[in-house]
Amino acid sequence: MESIFHEKQEGSLCAQHCLNNLLQGEYFSPVELSAIAQQLDEEERVRMAEGGVQTEEYRTFLQQPSGNMDDSGFFSIQWFNLNSLLTGPELISDTYLALFLAQLQQEGYSIFVIRGSLPECEADQILRIMRVEQQQRPKLIGEDEAQRCTDRREARDAHSCH
């Protein structure tokens, strides 16, 4: 087990430990994550300013604390299940991530870790500006149709019994 990287909890640096454990190495320090969070704050400020620096929204935004970090060691990270059998991306909470990965592994799925730089995409830009909240979990492709068929069959069977 010595070949598996495991960073033990230190203070409230959950995001740092999670990222380093997931990536299997000492990739992020509190200082580096703080710098990233400050960069995200600045990019958010610039984007908000595009709507006008005299607007009420901009002034309110400037008065709010960072949504990307705080002094306790909190860093905002969002995880997504991009299973191509789902009707869309599924937001995964930090709490559920470990359980989700363990379940996938137990079911025999392969889990791949990507190291290195990834190309910039529109999703990265959006996630820098705002935190995403998912109102409804995406369904498996065909799940709605299968449920409608089941409902029709049950209704037909119930009707034929009377």
Image (cartoon, helix red, strand yellow):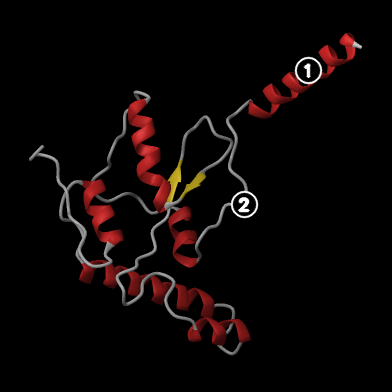
Residue found 60% across the figure and 35% down from its top: 139
Q: Nearer the viewer, residue 137 or 38?
A: 137
Residue at the far bottom: name it. 54
Question: Number of callouts in the render?
Answer: 2
Residue found 46% across the figure and 73% down from its top: 44
Q: Residues within 10 Å of mark 1 (few under 14, many from 20)?
A: few
Position of the N terminus, as image quadrant, is top left
Residue at the far left: name it. 2
Q: Is residue 96 above or below residue 129?
A: above
Hey, what amino acid is under mark 2?
Gln
Foreground: disc 1 or disc 2: 1
Q: Position of residue 42 (x, y in %)?
A: 40, 77
Quadrant housing residue 66: bottom left
Tell me which label, 1 or 2, sits earlier in the chain.
2
Q: Is residue 109 visible?
A: no
Residue, disc 2: 135
Residue, disc 1: 154
How far apart marks 1 and 2 lie (CA) works out to: 29 Å
Q: Assess whether mark 2 and mark 1 are in contact (beta carbons under 8 angstroms).
A: no
Q: Is residue 98 visible?
A: yes
Q: Is residue 112 above or below residue 147?
A: below
Residue at the far top: name it. 160
Residue found 55% across the figure and 57% down from its top: 133
Hey, what amino acid is under mark 1?
Glu
Secondary structure type for disc 2: loop
Q: Position of residue 99 (x, y in %)?
A: 38, 40
Whether residue 44 sits left or right of residue 28 in the image: it is right
Q: Is residue 149 above or below residue 110?
A: above
Secondary structure type for disc 1: helix
Q: Position of residue 115 (x, y in %)?
A: 23, 45
Whether residue 31 sits left or right of residue 51 in the image: it is left
